[in-house]
Image: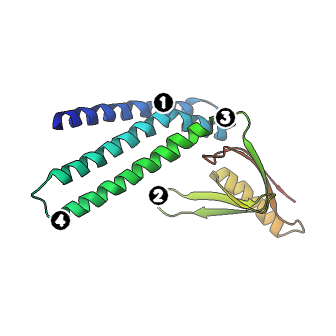
Amino acid sequence: MKKILNTLFMILGILTLLSAVPTLIPLFIGQDGERIEVLQTYFSIPFYLFLSLLILLLAGSLLFMTARDRAGSRGTKLVLGLVSVIMVGIGVFAAVTQVVYPLRDIPYLREPRIVVLEDVRFHYDNIGDSPSISMQGIDGEGREQQFSIGSQEYEQGEMLYEQAYGSEEEAVMAQVEYLPYSRMILRMELWID
């Protein structure tokens, strides 16, 4: 059993590393930011699939070894079981957000969803290693919509927001073309209304 697990780990590890190579291809293609992001998302699906499988296999083998170990204390078994459950959660989350959602978005690549947002606001959170930049506004049905955006869109939006705040115009508006499951923006226009 141990030999089979080692072989499986080695195969999944190699496949994970090899599948990371295509994620670099969009960086060498001279396209605009949104298209590069879409390409990168779809080229990275195999990487995240194998990474999720590797994490799930690791969690399963850790749970199996914990259950078979009769000498370990209850506290150790509890901690290892908890770590396994957390790893399963991480593996499933990565698989759903990085594999399933982009695959479900494929029919929308030619005809993405379009929403017009009113009262658009921009948020920049610099917590951790990488900042989280988002935009939110109210759609035509009165629901709040939120999207992750890049730093360029943030700067453009903040500049428009400052113009709207200091003038007679009402608010910043946005038209967003996006993929419904991954919430990836394909095109966005901002203006003051």
Looking at the image, is mark 2 or mark 1 earlier in the sequence? 1
Could you tell me residue 20's position as x and y percent?
43, 34
Label 2 sits on a secondary structure element that is loop
Q: Is residue 5 above or below residue 150?
A: above
Q: Who comes first in sequence, dot 3 or dot 2?
A: 3
Q: Earlier in the sequence, mark 4 or mark 2?
A: 4
Which residue type does callout 2 highlight?
Answer: Asp
Mark 3 or 4: in front is: 4
Residue of label 3 = 107
Q: Nearer the viewer, mark 3 or mark 2?
A: 3
Q: Secondary structure at mark 1?
A: helix
> Which disc is residue 129 wearing?
2
Q: CA distance from mark 1 to mark 3?
A: 22 Å
Q: Which mark is first along the chain, 4 or 3?
A: 4
Q: Residue at x 11, y 56 (%)?
A: 70
Left or right of residue 115: residue 93:
left
Q: Residues within 10 Å of mark 1 (few under 14, many from 20)?
A: some
Instruction: State the residue lying farthest toward the left.
Output: 71
- Could you tell me which residue is drawn at 72 percent across and 33 percent down? 110
Tell me, for residue 74, which label it has, or none: 4
Tell me which amino acid carries mark 1: Pro
Numbered circle sitting on residue 22: 1
Instruction: Name the residue: 21% across, 33% down.
Output: 4
Quarter of image, res 39: top right
